[in-house]
Amino acid sequence: MTFEIENVSKTFISKGRGETIKALEDINLTIETGKFVCFVGPSGCGKTTLLRLMEGFELPDEGTIKDDGELVTKPSRERGFIFQDYSLFPWLNVLDNVTFGLNIAGRPEEENKERAYKYLDAVGLRDFATKYPHELSGGMKQRVAIIRSIINESKSLLMDEPFSALDVQTKHKLEEQLVNNWRQNDRTVIFVTHDVEEAVFLSDEIVVFSRRPGRIKKVFKNELPRPRNRGDHVFQDFVNEVTEEIDESEDD
Amino acid sequence: MTDIRLYNKLEKLIFPIILIIIWYIICDVLMLIPSYMFPGPVEVVNSFIKLLVTGKLFKDIIDTLYKVLLGLFLAAVVGITFGIILGWSKRLERLCTLIISILRPIPPIAWIPFSILWFGIGTAPAVFIIFMGCVFPILVSTIDGVHRTRGVLIEAAQSFGASNMQMLTEVVLPATVPYIVSGLKVGIGIALMCTISGEMIGSSSGIGYMILTSTSLFDTGSTVVGMLVIGIIGIIFDYIFTKIQERIFW
Ligand SMILES: Nc1ncnc2c1ncn2[C@@H]1O[C@H](COP(=O)(O)OP(=O)(O)OP(=O)(O)O)[C@@H](O)[C@H]1O
Ligand SMILES: [Mg+2]
């Protein structure tokens, strides 16, 4: 068991008018170690909020979140987090960005570099090691951000719509690499997305959220055999099934 | 292309040259103003050559620059360190904000009496005044820079397990560098002004001292040389800092 989320609620008070927004209400969810879990649901239903609570960036108003039995109270190096926005350090080049986590953990810098080159090789960015983030395309930046987290070999990886800004080809390629990397490790991945097809391609489980206040509407087990093919009938049927579930919650 | 650029550069010179010609006609040709009131360009050039040959000008420039850079350096060390700490800790900032807002608007020259009382005459009082003049702009823009550090970068570092100290040195400080540099740029301008005023009152060397003492000897030419030298030093520093700012790409 990696994550145990019990009775979690979260309300925001918007700064201007003092209005309150109930982002999450009574969330109960258990995520087992090594699973690849996707969060899907309409915009504003609290997916990012729950992911941020799981990392420990913010604390729930009610309820508890445990990671391997320990209460989550602050961010941890055991939970890698990949942001929707670009989050590379603009003053560091690609190599130094990728080794950031290893370096501040006090690991030997030469080894860190070697390891970084291996990862950069895998995503075709070796030649960009000495470039700075502003010299990269959006897809390259996101690849760097992903390996910057993956390289730390944290127990789990929380990803907030990491591929949403990318073109379809790049996206499919990165999805494949992500799955391959995940299958070689015993790492739990939580992946937020708008794209149901992406969720079906990647996940073991799909958690569908309903709109405000954010609640878990349904949890789908995804037992399609891997490697998966987007063209398969069963694949598309499953996509439709999940999409319908989301659309229903969109209506009310 | 290059023709236009060259023209643009030369264009800047047109007005100053006309001004010098008018100045020359009024003072040196028509002799409308006696030189003990204001020198003509010929006398200024003569004073310049004299100051250059005796080595006095060089010595005074070095003397003034030394004070400016020392004062600025001390102000930078204090301003950046406290700026990072106060910007990071909401609590400490709240505790200090009133003191800073009261001290900040006091013109650095107002510290001259105390600087003489505490440090006597010489380099130290001037450095103290420069310090008082520069430290607040540097402090305030550092604090501002810390506040503007993107939250996502701080959170990213947290998810890599950065300690508080690592957060300050590896994330907040580099993110704040552009703001620190603009604080330093404002600071150096103030430092120049402070140095000259400081040297005029509590000093026995430097360009400020030269400016003041030469008028009492009716050597108005040297006064103008001193004034122009300050202006030129200002331009050079401004150019250097502008170049540094251009090289910072975040
Ligand atoms: N810091 C905050 N302050 C105030 N309201 C917030 C804050 N963060 C989120 N909210 C509100 O909480 C609700 C859920 O937001 P959240 O970002 O979790 O949605 P989401 O499911 O990730 O949406 P999207 O798919 O568009 O990214 C929204 O109504 C949002 O306006
Ligand atoms: Mg979101």
Image: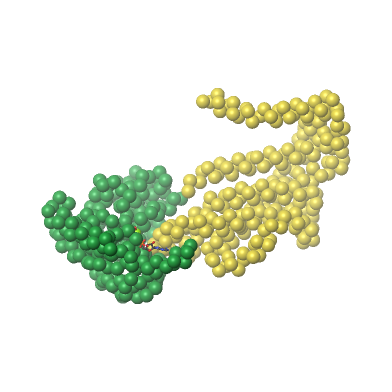
Residue B31: x and y in percent read 86, 27
Chain B hue? yellow
Chain drawn in green: A
Residue A245: x and y in percent read 22, 62
Residue at x-position 60% and y-position 51%: B183
Residue B206: x and y in percent read 76, 46
Instruction: Give whichever of B38, A209 is nearer the camera.
Output: A209
**In this orientation, does residue B220 appear?**
yes
Instruction: Give whichever of A153, B53 is nearer the camera.
Output: A153
Residue at x-position 42% and y-position 58%: B152
Horizontal side, residue B238 vs residue B228: left or right: left
**In this orientation, does residue B66 appear?**
no
Residue A20: x and y in percent read 42, 68
Number of marks in the rendered image? 0
Question: Where does ligand 1 appear, by image quarter?
Answer: bottom left
Question: Image quarter for residue A72?
Answer: bottom left
- Taking the view exactly as shown, the residue that stands out farthest to the left is A233
Position of A113 relative to B9 (above/below): below
Residue at x-position 44% and y-position 64%: A14
Position of A17 relative to A120 (above/below): below
Residue at x-position 81% and y-position 35%: B221
Position of A251 relative to B220 (above/below): below
Instruction: Give whichever of A95, B91 is nearer the camera.
Output: B91
